[in-house]
Amino acid sequence: MRGWWQEIAGLVLPVDCAGCGLPRTELCERCRGLLGGAASVRRVRPVPEPPGLPPVCAVARYGDEVRAVLLAHKERGALGLARPLGRALAAAVAGLDVAGAVLLVPVPSARRAVARRGHDATARMARAAAAVLRGQGTPARAAAVLRQRRLVADQSGLDAAGRSANLSGAVEAAGGAAGLLAAVPVVLVDDLVTTGTSLSVAAQAVTVAGGRVAGAAVVADVGLR
């Protein structure tokens, strides 16, 4: 119900740009451009790189307006931003040069965080990205088939070692997902990459379930090279 009311409110109430605050536009052209596109896709890697991290493509740097847009979508329920964020993710997926069909698998968020927000932000972006890719001729679908099997701490205040310990063994594929994961190459998707721990743990869960991870796509990276 909360998500439904947010959708209706976004249609009838005036909004300001989620990135810079420009009045009466959910996302201005300048901030839309900061989310990048095909020309801004780049491979990124954290240092140190966690074991099992697949190739990662990003389209934007995390900071200022990009940070504001991601937080507005995730934390404040600006659901209309899923479309431009999905386009950014789709550009990152295309940068991985995966041939043929692809399955976009969002990195799972903690259940309590999803419940608090009233929506699964990463899964919503993944579905939007899959729709963009299909429109471009790439057979793509999104499936939220990974889940956290136990409670984990908030990652934001943890360093690389802390994140690794926090997430070790915490992610698994849902029951019955093995056939889907094994059918086509998997691209993991998330809004942000910092240490790469979440992506490496998710990749391990896909591999254990019999899938093949072709890479990972994110909207933004935190100053990675």
Image (cartoon, rainbow, N blue to C red):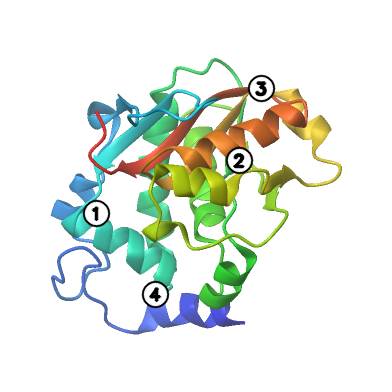
Say if mark 1 contacts mark 2, CB within 8 Å: no
Q: Quadrant of residue 40?
A: top left
Q: In this view of the protein, can residue 129 be seen by the observer?
A: no
Q: Secondary structure at mark 4?
A: loop
Give the numbered dot on residue 66: 1
Q: Earlier in the sequence, mark 3 or mark 1?
A: 1
The kind of residue on which mark 2 rests is Val
Q: Quadrant of residue 224?
A: top left
- Residue 111's place in the image compared with 24, above or below, is above
Which residue does the numbered mark 4 point to in the structure image?
76
Say if mark 3 contacts mark 1, CB within 8 Å: no
As measured in the structure, the alpha-carbon distance from the residue carrying label 3 to the one carrying label 1 is 31 Å
Q: Earlier in the sequence, mark 3 or mark 4?
A: 4
- Residue 152's place in the image compared with 58, above or below, is below
Where residue 88 appears, x then y in whole percent? 35, 42
Asked if residue 83 lies left or right of residue 13, the reply is: right
Where residue 221 appears, x then y in whole percent? 30, 41
Give the numbered dot on residue 212: 3
Q: Earlier in the sequence, mark 1 or mark 4?
A: 1
As measured in the structure, the alpha-carbon distance from the residue carrying label 3 to the one carrying label 4 is 34 Å
Count of numbered badges drawn on the protein: 4
- Residue 67's place in the image compared with 94, above or below, is below
Say if mark 3 contacts mark 4, CB within 8 Å: no
Q: Earlier in the sequence, mark 1 or mark 2?
A: 1
Dot 3: within a 10 Å radius of its alpha carbon, few (fewer than 14), some, or many (20 or more) residues? some
Q: Earlier in the sequence, mark 2 or mark 4?
A: 4
- Residue 108's place in the image compared with 53, above or below, is below
